[in-house]
Image: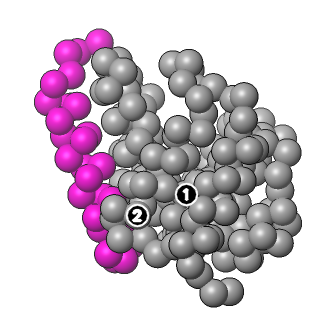
């Protein structure tokens, strides 16, 4: 598949449409999150297909879209990267979380890059909204750093550095619970 800026624009448009009406816990439109994830990926040096996957990273998990829908529009690589980011909510949580971790660890590095960008945005959004990131949020960030510790792609190195700096700032500033 030939990549171009149109891939990114089409992914943004589809994500905006599929997430229309959804809101985050802080009340902001949900689409802002995938838009920020895609921007974080682009700033880290990701190519267009990975930026497109950043826009789409929650559509399988949170909308009626499935792997085939994404594959038909953006190709199997983008669909596979998005699928790597999607938890199987049919599984009970004690099975789901280890399965998800294995899925990301064993999957393509691009899925792990999206996970890092997702965590950068989640931590940043907590800080911007003047919320103290809780233990669960910090655990998720450290988990993303753990599963990417062996990756050596430039995009992942850049994202890891950003996330490590955020975790450090938050850890230093944290008041014990």
The residue most toward the left is 172
**Which mark sits nearer the N-terminus, 1 or 2?**
2
Q: Residues within 10 Å of mark 2 (few under 14, many from 20)?
A: some
Hey, which quadrant is residue 151 in on the image? bottom left
Hey, which quadrant is residue 4 in on the image? bottom right
Residue, x 20% and y 15% (percent of image)? 175
Q: Position of residue 128 (x, y in %)?
A: 32, 26
Q: Position of residue 61 (x, y in %)?
A: 73, 45
Q: Are marks 1 and 2 in contact (CB under 8 Å)?
A: yes
Q: Is 65 contained in the magenta span?
A: no
The residue most toward the bottom is 2
Applied colour scheme: one colour
The residue most toward the top is 177
6 shown above or below 133: below
Residue, x 29% and y 12% (percent of image)? 177
Q: Which residue corresponds to mark 1?
A: 54
Q: Position of residue 100 (x, y in %)?
A: 64, 52
Q: Which residue corresponds to mark 2?
A: 42
Q: Position of residue 8 (x, y in %)?
A: 57, 65
Q: Secondary structure at mark 1?
A: helix
Residue, x 23% and y 15% (percent of image)? 176
Whole-number angstrom distance, CA of label 1 to CA of label 2 = 9 Å
Residue, x 67% and y 53% (percent of image)? 13
Is residue 112 in sight in this rendering? Answer: no
Q: What's drawn in magenta, residue-wise? A: 149-177
Q: Is 157 contained in the magenta span?
A: yes
């Amino acid at each position: 598949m030939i990549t171009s800026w149109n891939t990114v624009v089409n992914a943004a448009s589809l994500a905006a449409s599929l997430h229309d009406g959804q809101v985050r816990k802080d009340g902001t439109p949900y689409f802002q999150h995938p838009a920020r994830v895609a921007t974080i990926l682009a700033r880290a040096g990701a190519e267009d297909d990975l930026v497109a996957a950043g826009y789409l990273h929650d559509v399988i998990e949170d909308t009626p879209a499935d792997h085939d829908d994404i594959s038909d529009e953006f190709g199997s690589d983008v669909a596979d990267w998005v699928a790597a980011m999607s938890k199987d909510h049919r599984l009970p949580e004690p099975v789901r979380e280890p399965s998800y971790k294995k899925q990301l660890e064993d999957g393509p590095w691009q899925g792990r890059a999206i996970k890092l960008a997702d965590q950068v945005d989640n931590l940043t959004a907590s800080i911007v909204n003047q919320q103290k990131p809780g233990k669960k949020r910090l655990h998720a960030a450290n988990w993303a750093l753990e599963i990417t510790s062996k990756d050596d792609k430039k995009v992942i190195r850049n994202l890891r550095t950003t996330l490590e700096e955020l975790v450090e700032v938050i850890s230093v500033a944290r008041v014990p619970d």
